[in-house]
Amino acid sequence: MIGLIDEHDAVLVDEVHAGLAVRAGGYYVDATFGRGGHTARILKTVGGEGRVLALDRDPQAIAAGRRRFANDLRLTLQHAPFSDLAVLVPAHSQGRQCAGVLFDLGVSSPQLDAPERGFSFRADGPLDMRMDPTRGEPVAAWLARASVDEMREVIATLGEERFARRVAQAIATARERTPITRTAQLAQLLARAVRTREPGKNPATRTFQALRMFINDELGQLQAGLDAAFAVLAPGGRLAVISFHSLEDRAVKQFMARHSSVDPALARLPVIPASAQPRMKLVGRKQRATAQELARNPRARSALLRVAEKLA
Ligand SMILES: C[S@@+](CC[C@H](N)C(=O)[O-])C[C@H]1O[C@@H](n2cnc3c(N)ncnc32)[C@H](O)[C@@H]1O
């Protein structure tokens, strides 16, 4: 069981490797280490002179990485949110140029599979959902104090749940009787509040996603992480981002579009000022997992990879 719980089948590994154009001697940042599937592949290519800085905000991911890569001095593992990249990379790089940054967003299988982390509506556990349990507050604490409007807003926006108001109201009514502290309690409540059934989707899916994204500030982290990655990349360096749902992908797409195009307000000038020139170029089109990978790893179903390169 432990073996199962502590594994994560990395997605789009070949595509990321090609997208980052990983080369011997390069210095790379894996912003979302997880269980190190992508890091392992990068380490294979960079050789003796290459280096990798890998971050994860989950202390369990870092602990597992220290066990797996204990003897690999080319790898530095750091427990930190990727919004801290702009500070961490210069502190760690020893003057090396950063050739690539990878974000493989969302949660890992070990996080989802461990009931005690509270991410899953399939198994009962404490209603927590923090990727970093050493910071912030668990979902249960927020649900105990949030107003109906705050809950509705989060569930509607981040979960795109059309029954957001009913769900928020149901939570407010239920918590007057007894605090909502367990994932099973919330899942049962959602099964009643969400009226229609989407094929293949548990009625708790959207609300759990919304609460997870909210409590971990995932979109705020993504925005800060992308800005920081852009700042630390060397000219010619590559940015690869794997997202798992439309809200994340929209943010990534907009970020890359903004940096790879001329400001429309200035595009018609006869001479475009250097400060308004594109600062990135898109590399290839967005990519999804191949049929072969999907057959092996169903989690890759919604994974979408985008790559861009920083220009000189
Ligand atoms: C999909 S998994 C990554 C899997 C990894 N690529 C592998 O091959 O095992 C996402 C990981 O990113 C971490 N994570 C998510 N948001 C983060 C953030 N803002 N800062 C640092 N780590 C984050 C999660 O804790 C999780 O371990």
Image: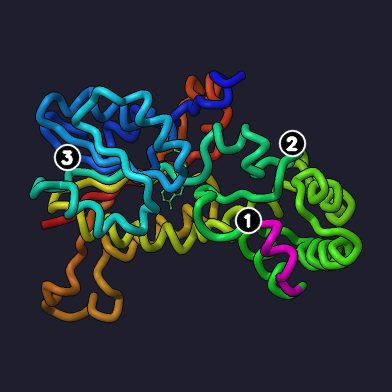
The image shows residue 137 at horizontal and vertical percentages of 59, 59
Categorize mark 3 by other alpha carbons within 10 Å: few (<14), some (14-19), many (20+): many
The image shows residue 309 at horizontal and vertical percentages of 22, 50
Categorize mark 1 by other alpha carbons within 10 Å: few (<14), some (14-19), many (20+): many
The image shows residue 223 at horizontal and vertical percentages of 40, 62
Seen from the viewer's position, the closer of residues 187 and 250 is 187
Q: Does the residue labelled 2 lie within 8 Å of ligand 1?
A: no
Scheme by which the image is coloured: rainbow
Q: What residue type is labelled 3?
A: Tyr
Q: In which quarter of the image is the N terminus?
A: top right
Residue hosting label 2: 122
- Region of the chain picked out in magenta, as a range: 139-147
Which residue is at a point 54% across and 49% down the rendered structure image? 133
N-terminal of the pair, mark 1 or mark 3, is: 3
Categorize mark 2 by other alpha carbons within 10 Å: few (<14), some (14-19), many (20+): some
Which residue is at a point 47% across and 37% down the rendered structure image? 60
- Mark 1 or mark 2, whichever is nearer to me: 1
Residue 301 disc label: none
The image shows residue 286 at horizontal and vertical percentages of 40, 44
Residue hosting label 3: 27
Q: Is mark 1 within 8 Å of ligand 1?
A: no
Relative to residue 162, is residue 13 drawn left or right?
A: left
* Label 3 element class: strand
Seen from the viewer's position, the closer of residues 271 and 199 is 199
Residue 15 sits inside the magenta stretch: no
Q: Do the residues labelled 1 and 2 touch (CB within 8 Å)?
A: no
Task: Determine the CA span between mark 1 and mark 3.
Answer: 36 Å
Relative to residue 88, is residue 33 drawn left or right?
A: right
Residue hosting label 1: 138
